[in-house]
Image (cartoon, rainbow, N blue to C red):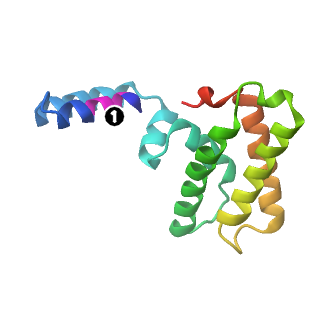
Amino acid sequence: MERLVALLQEYNSGAHDVDQLFDELVALAKDLNEEEQRAVKENLSEDELAIFDLLLKEKLNPDEVAIVKGTAHDLLASLKPLLVPHWRDFETNRAGVKVAISDLLFTKLPEPTYTEKDCELKGLEVYNFVYENYRDASAFI
């Protein structure tokens, strides 16, 4: 994702013409792995894509998918300040992360598609993912 942003910034600054940008975008697309391609296609960061996948349910309409994408984005943004160094070592910090996840999911996920039980289960999945993958906010891509 950083490479794409850098290419666009170079183009916008006038360092590249359209043909050169196109050639570099084609080369970038060839270099991307499948998940990176999916993240670009979904217009999500790799972290957001991971959370999106955890939140996603089958048979969502396009509006609901958009809401779930926004929820994944908002969730990561709200968690970053809570993931202080060693947050996993203190019960109050872990509880704060759990509450932040639950509050956001209950507020943002579309009803009635996501029931209270769905929000509880998805919240637990997201918490476990965050606990296992993020020691602190610097771990975000």
Above or below: residue 126 compared with residue 115: above
Residue, disc 1: 5
Which residue is at a point 82% across and 57% down the rendered structure image?
120
The residue closer to the viewer here, 58 or 122, is: 122
- Residue 6 in magenta? yes
Which residue is at a point 64% across and 39% down the rendered structure image?
81
- Residue 100 in magenta? no
In what quadrant of the picture does the C terminus appear? Answer: top right
Name the outermost residue toward the bottom: 112
The residue closer to the viewer here, 77 or 42, is: 77
- Type of residue at label 1? Val
Q: What's drawn in magenta, residue-wise? A: 3-7
Left-right relation of 88 to 37: right
Count all numbered tags in the image, as a single digit. Answer: 1
Which residue is at a point 63% across and 39% down the rendered structure image?
80
- The x and y percentages for residue 74 are 58, 52
Left-right relation of 115 to 136: right
Above or below: residue 78 compared with residue 119: above
Which residue is at a point 72% across and 67% down the rendered structure image?
114
| Secondary element at tag 1 | helix
- The x and y percentages for residue 98 are 80, 47
